[in-house]
Image (cartoon, grey):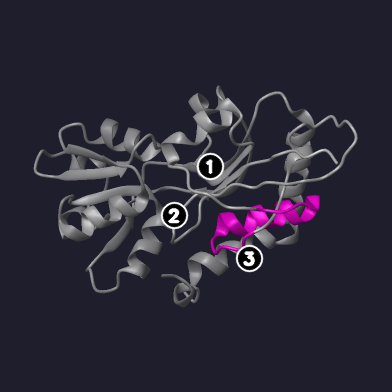
Amino acid sequence: MKKTKWTMVVLMIGCLLAGCAEMNQTTKASSSPVMDRMTKDDKIIGVDVDLATMIADAMGVRLNVQRIDFNGLLPALESGRIDMIVSNMTMTPDRNMKAAFVGPYFTSGKAFLTKRSSIAQAKGMPDVNNPQYTFVALKGSTSEAVIAKGAPQAKHLTAATQNDAIQMVVDGRADAMIADFPICVVAVYRNPAAGLVSVVTPITYEPIGIAVPKGDPHLLNWLGNFLQGLEKAGYLHDLGQKWFAQPTWLPQMK
């Protein structure tokens, strides 16, 4: 039996980890090398994990999970270490030069996570472009670029994971984190006693997509058709409601 390996990276809302998938199967030659290496295994909570599970189930394969820092996702995809990223990744022109994208499957925007009322009441980036403020963002993310461009006079810090960045705000080492709105909302839910608030900034449009290696038109076609089917059937809307409208999943988390 021929054994092949397929890796998918998934952002787990709340845990904010990454995942991979591995599969063993016997197949004939296919027009999609990535689809020939697909899997499904561990069950973890999160909107992206749910979507990855739907994809794997539809392909009849098994999903497995591992950690990869966000900044290492595209290099891992380019090197062949992983084969698909479902990790709250914004589709940008620069990233699209390195990978192919399908989507968006979710539309987001940047938000501030803070305990400071002056930042929570800001109307735009000019209001926070001040050296008295210290901001933190995920290293290598669009959030890091947004804060560097929008508030160059402020102090800038980076974190390897979203959890690290959130903890810096909770501990007072940063005045605010800038990240995609769903991540900030989850942070408020998970830290009810920390005095955190999340405010959407009116400056960004974040189309979230699935990243796959370049040169696989069959996989792109399959994923595009699959996402369209989920959207038309209302499943993507249901996922958003499940994870962002009510924090009923909190008891399942550490």
Q: Is residue 75 above or below residue 166?
A: above
The percent coordinates of residue 55 (x first, y second) are 72, 51
Residue at 9 percent across and 43 percent down: it is: 132
For the record, the magenta segment spans 42-63
Q: Which residue is labeled 3 in the image?
A: 238
Q: Residues within 10 Å of mark 2 (few under 14, many from 20)?
A: some
Residue at the outermost front position: 1
Please tell me whether residue 16 belongs to the stretch shown in magenta.
no
Residue 49 in the image, given as x and y percentages of width and height: 59, 56
Disc 1 + disc 2, Cβ < 8 Å: no
| Residue where numbered disc 1 is placed | 207
Tell me if I can see residue 110 in this picture: yes
> Mark 1 vs mark 2: which is more N-terminal?
2
| Residue at 36% over, 40% down | 143
When the figure is inspected, residue 18 is found, relative to residue 30, above or below; the finding is below
Tell me which label, 3 or 1, sits earlier in the chain.
1
In the drawing, does residue 226 fall left or right of residue 67? right
Q: Nearer the viewer, residue 126 or 253?
A: 253
Dot 3 or dot 2: first in sequence order is 2
Q: Amino acid at mark 3?
A: Asp
Q: Callout 3: helix, strand or loop?
A: helix
x and y, in percent, of residue 226 in the image: 76, 48
Is 49 placed left or right of 31 in the picture?
Answer: left
Q: Which three-letter amino acid code belongs to the residue tagged 2?
A: Leu
- Against 171, is 139 above or below? above
